[in-house]
Amino acid sequence: MRSLFLSVFLAAIVAGSAFADSCAADPDCILAGYDYFVTQPGTFFTIAGVVVPLLGIPDPSNSGADTIVQRLGNIDVPDVPGATEIVHTQMMELQLTGLDPSCPQPGVGACDVTIKLDPSIPTMGTLIFVQTVSGEATVNPSCGGDTMPCEGTFTSFFDVFFDLSFTTPGGAPLPCDPSGHTTCLQPDLTLTGSGSWTDDNGEMFIDGGLVTETHPTPPGVHDARQIPTPEPGALVLFGTVLSLVALWRRRQARG
């Protein structure tokens, strides 16, 4: 058992070092890490043919973010027009709520709806970056606008697995399927988005901070604004390593 915890500890150090080392020679490289978003007005989801406006449920432990995405690789696009890079991602948190004016449950009228990621199936995705300017960020129409400096465009994709739950306006749970369950896994949805980016702002790589993701069937839109990372990725890794060390030492002490 000691060797297992020591192996996990060393693996964490090696993984963190690998990401850092691959960026060491490039000041423009953005280390793998987390992006935090707050859902904006204009977000909606179509439920049983009814458009339901949605707001985020703030997570106080993450600076009020309601959507969290983990970038599983570094962003390190060469400063050459036409250069591309694919970064794999995982959506770690999605918490939305709204008032459904015509609840799918018979005889209820309006009801509250909550959307959260299904914890049993990972929501994976990709970010595809394209460099459209030569060198560092400049104000350039090729990025989709001409008012902010950027280095290129990106497209995002997620295969989202989520749970749907309903409650009465008073908070009483309502069944979401014929079996009487109050939380129900939905068919997966694909969310696609686009925007412009720069590697001159650290982890705040989205130019303007706003990303819009859509899915056509059923129609839906998720508008979200990026907020500063609550805790730098290096500190998150450091904290994880310290926790592993403490756990390993406790195991050693127990013999």
Image (tube, helix red, strand yellow):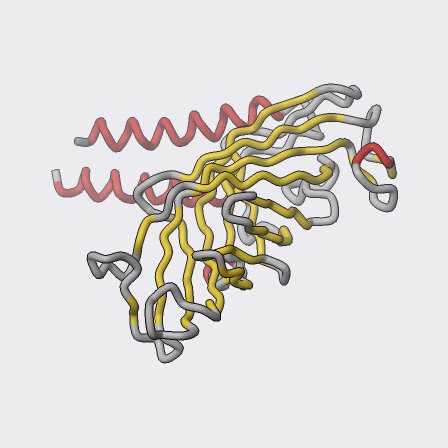
> For the image shown, how many numbered marks are present on the structure?
0
Residue 74 location (% of width, % of height): 58, 29
Specify the quadrant that holds the N terminus.
top left
Above or below: residue 49 compared with residue 189: below
Q: Residue at x 49, y 27 (%)?
A: 17
Q: Which residue is drawn at 22% across and 27% down?
A: 3
Residue 110 location (% of width, % of height): 43, 73
Q: Residue at x 19, y 38 (%)?
A: 252
Above or below: residue 156 compared with residue 173: above
Determine whether, in the image, residue 169 is placed left or right of residue 1: right
Specify the quadrant that holds the C terminus.
top left
Residue 240 location (% of width, % of height): 39, 42
Residue 201 in view of the camera: yes
Residue that lies at the very extreme toward the left in this rendered image: 255
Q: Residue at x 58, y 51 (%)?
A: 221
Determine whether, in the image, residue 254 is placed left or right of residue 241: left
